[in-house]
Amino acid sequence: MAELKYISGFGNECSSEDPRCPGSLPEGQNNPQVCPYNLYAEQLSGSAFTCPRSTNKRSWLYRILPSVSHKPFESIDEGQVTHNWDEVDPDPNQLRWKPFEIPKASQKKVDFVSGLHTLCGAGDIKSNNGLAIHIFLCNTSMENRCFYNSDGDFLIVPQKGNLLIYTEFGKMLVQPNEICVIQRGMRFSIDVFEETRGYILEVYGVHFELPDLGPIGANGLANPRDFLIPIAWYEDRQVPGGYTVINKYQGKLFAAKQDRTRKYYVRIALKSQVLGVGTFRGLLPSPGLTNPGTVSIASSSRLKLPGEASQQDVSPFNVVAWHGNYTPYKYNLKNFMVINSVAFDHADPSIFTVLTAKSVRPGVAIADFVIFPPRWGVADKTFRPPYYHRNCMSEFMGLIRGHYEAKQGGFLPGGGSLHSTMTPHGPDADCFEKASKVKLAPERIADGTMAFMFESSLSLAVTKWGLKASRCLDENYHKCWEPLKSHFTPNSRNPAEPN
Ligand SMILES: O=C(O)Cc1cc(O)ccc1O
Ligand SMILES: [Fe+2]
C-alpha cells in the first residue's frame, strides 16, 4: 500500500481535496447552490453551534451522497458493549488483568466492532458526562461495515497489530506506540492484519485537548505539529446487499443499511403497447426518484437510466473534499518531549499527560491520557520508582510493550490494572527493595517500553465482562505487596547508606 499522507497540527482549521477531483472544495462559501462536481455539502458539528470560538468544532464534508441516505436503524446485539455501571457490586480492591485473550481467526472471525468489550466506566451517557474503557480483541477486518459513536470520542491505543482506519476524512495507519482519536459522529472502518488487541478510552460529551504548559513554556510534552490528520480520500462503489452503518447510541448498538438498490414497478411497453407489469431490483434511476416509478423499456433495448451521475455509491467513505477543525487524528508516542525531575524527588505523573478531556472543574479531568515513556532517571538521593500512594482519582493502566517500572512481573503487555479512588497501591515488594538499595547513577528508565494510564476523576465501575467473562482477572495481584516488611529502626534515625 502506498504511503499515506497526513496534514500536521492539533486542532487547526484544515482543508483537503482528494487529488482526483481538483477544485472540489467550494470557494468562499460553504453552501453553494450547486457544489463542485455536483457533490452534497454536509456539516458535522462537534460542539454546540454557540460554543465560544476557542472550543467551537465543526467540519464541512463534500460528498457523493449525504449521510442521511440510509434505511432505518435497527437495534442489534451489543455483545460485550455496555454502559450499565451497576452490573456487579462495587469492589475497591486493586485489580489486575492478565493479557486479554484475542480470539483465534481459525475459531471465530471477529472484527473491531464485534470485538469491543467494555471493561469499566462511570457517568451518564444521556447527560454527556462520563467515560468508558473498552478493550478491543479482533482478528478480521470490518467488511462493508463502518461504525460511528453518538455518545463520545474514542481514544484508541493499539497494543498488538496495525490498524488501517478508513474515515470520512481519509485513511490513517495506526501502529502500536501510536494512538488515534476518532471523535463523536465520525464514521470509520478498521482493517486488521493479524490477531489484534488494544485499549479505548471513550469520553462522553467532551473532546481531548493538549494540556496547558504553564511554566514549562511554549514547547514540550506532546507538540501540536506531531498530530497527524488524514487527507481526503473517497471511494464510489456498490456493495451487493448494501453497506452496514453501525451506530453506538445511548450505549446501545444499531445498524442501518446503505443500499442503492430499490424495488421498482416496471411497465414493460412494446410498440407503445403495455405488455405487462413486473418488478425488478435495480439501481436508483435518478436521485429524485425514490418511490416506485414507471420506466418504459423499448423492446430489445437495455434499460436506460437517465443521468450520468454516479449511482453506485453506498460507501460512507464518499467524501471528496472537506474543511474544518473537527477531524480524526493520530499521534506517535515516540514524539513525546519528556519533562522530569533533574535534581531530586519523584514528580507526579501529570508531567506525562499527552491529552486531557477536561471537566468543568478547573484542573480536574474527566480523563487524562498519560504515558510512561523511555527517559533518563537522574534524580539524586531519591527513591526513583513511583511512590506509594492513594489517589482521589481512578487510575487504569495498560502496557503497550516492555515492562513497567513499578512492577517486576505480573503486569504484562496487553493486560491492565485498575487502582480505584483512594485504593492504595505502589511498587511491588521486589521493586521497593531494589530501588531503596541501588547506588544512584543516571540510568535509562524503561527503554523500549511504553506503559500508559487513563486517569479519571470519576469513580469507575467494572463490568461483568471485566470481573468474570474475560477470565483474565489476576486473583493473586494483592500478593505482590505481601512480602513488604517493616524496616523501621526506632533507635537509629539515619538510613543505611546504599551499597
Ligand atoms: O500508580 C502508578 O503506577 C501510576 C503512577 C506513576 C507515578 O510515577 C506516580 C504516581 C502514579 O500514580
Ligand atoms: Fe498510581
Image: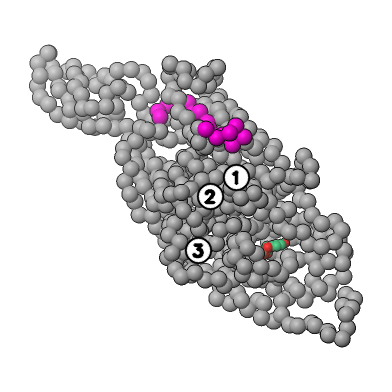
Identify the residue at horizontal 87%, vertical 63% (top origin). 380
Where is residue 92 drawn, in percent x and y? Answer: 55, 71
**Which amino acid, mark 2?**
Val
Using the rendered view, name the quadrant where residue 15 is placed.
top right
Mark sitting on residue 203: 2
**Which amino acid, mark 1?**
Phe
CB of mark 3 within 8 Å of CB of mark 1? no
CB of mark 2 within 8 Å of CB of mark 3? no
Residue named by callout 3: 461
Q: Nearer the viewer, residue 162 or 469?
A: 469
Q: Which residues are magenta?
A: 50-66
**Disc 2 element:** strand
**Disc 1 element:** loop
For the residues marked 2 and 1, what is the alpha-carbon distance in whole angstroms?
A: 9 Å
For the residues marked 3 and 1, what is the alpha-carbon distance in whole angstroms?
A: 22 Å
Where is residue 323 drawn, in percent x and y? Answer: 55, 27
Mark 1 CB lies closer than 8 A to ligand 1 = no
Q: Is residue 89 above or below residue 258?
A: below
Q: Nearer the viewer, residue 54 or 97?
A: 54
Identify the residue at horizontal 55%, vertical 35% (top origin). 51
**Disc 3 element:** strand
Residue named by callout 1: 208
Using the rendered view, name the quadrant where residue 324 is placed.
top right
Where is residue 359 drawn, in percent x and y? Answer: 58, 49
Q: Is residue 223 left or right of residue 160?
A: right
CB of mark 2 within 8 Å of CB of mark 1? yes
Q: Quadrant of the N terminus?
A: top right
Identify the residue at horizontal 23%, vertical 27% (top origin). 291
Where is residue 296 drawn, in percent x and y? Answer: 18, 18
Mark sitting on residue 302: none
For the residues marked 2 and 3, what is the alpha-carbon distance in whole angstroms?
A: 15 Å
